Amino acid sequence: MPTQLLLRPRVTPAGITTSSFLKNPPKAVAVAVRRRPGPGPGACACLSLTVSDAELSSRGFSVRRTAEGIDVAALNEVFARVGFPRRQEERLRRALQHSRVVWLEAAGDRRPVAFARAAGDGVFNAVVWDVVVEPSWQGLGLGRAVMERLVQDLRRDGVANIVLYAEPRVVGFYKLLDFAMDPDGIRGMAYYRSANSSSAAVTSL
């Protein structure tokens, strides 16, 4: 399998992509990879769910598999409460339009209590981003619920290579979902160009 170059830009509160973190690369970044052949477009993903849609519904949660109707401002608030940077709302809306999304809604108010998205080419590769659970709802298995459905949807599309970045403290969570550190030792790399220089730099994560 070809070496993958994974980009992890950091977003400022203003929603502007910056590469300042590359000057002091974070140590708490690991690349986890799930490499399994997809079942082919339209085929059954054949992944079991630890909690069914019906059970989630009985607990007051609605499963949403598109970004349609999501309260983007509320999503930004969840990002902030879990320590993620806020995004410019219009840019976030555009990102959601180009992502496969799974989120859980409570009380029918369009406010996400758990959220995950993936971006990619829709065929071969996908990268998982922004897996969050509203702090007051953590510990109930909602993060696993959205991730299982996101992976299920990607595999139903036939996507064979699903990757993500994870801090060491949550690697165990993703291992429960069959993610693993890349056995070939493939490292993520981030590209940036200094504003004061015509040269580019590449940092290994």
Image (cartoon, grey):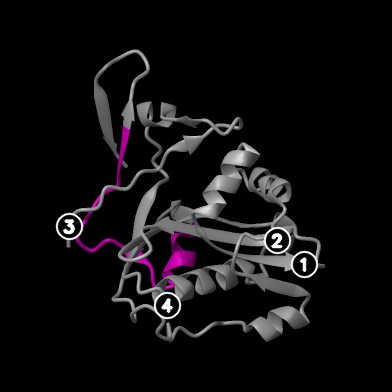
**Circle 1: is it few (<14), some (14-19), or many (20+) Cα within 10 Å?**
some
Magenta stretch containing residue 174, yes or no? yes
Give the label on residue 156, or none.
Answer: 4
Which amino acid, mark 3? Answer: Pro
Q: CA distance from mark 3 to mark 4?
A: 23 Å
Name the N-terminal-most of marks 1 and 2: 1
State the CA–CA distance, disc 2 to disc 4.
Answer: 25 Å
- Give the SS element for disc 2: strand
Q: Contact, CB < 8 Å: mark 1 with mark 2?
A: yes
Q: Residue at x 75, y 60 (%)?
A: 110
Choose the circle earlier in sequence order: 3 or 4.
3
The amino acid type found where label 1 is placed reads Ala
Q: Position of residue 178 (x, y in %)?
A: 39, 73
- Work out how far the residue at label 1 is from the one at label 2, CA to CA, in angstroms: 7 Å
How packed is label 3: few (under 14 Cα within 10 Å), some, or many (20 or more)? Answer: few
**Which disc number belongs to residue 113?**
2
Which residue position is annotated with label 3? 2
Element under disc 1: strand
Q: Tell whether label 4 touches label 3 (CB within 8 Å).
A: no
The foreground one among 27 and 203 is 203
Q: CA distance from mark 4 to mark 1?
A: 26 Å
Of the image marks 3 and 1, the number of the one nearer the N terminus:
3
Residue 4 among those drawn in magenta: no
Q: State the residue position of label 1.
A: 106
Mark 3 or mark 2, which has the lower sequence index? 3
Query: Is residue 71 toward the left or the right of residue 157 in the image?
Result: right
x and y percent of residue 109 in the render? 81, 61
Name the foreground residue: 176 vs 109: 109
Residue 116, quarter of the rendered image = bottom right
The magenta region covers 170-191
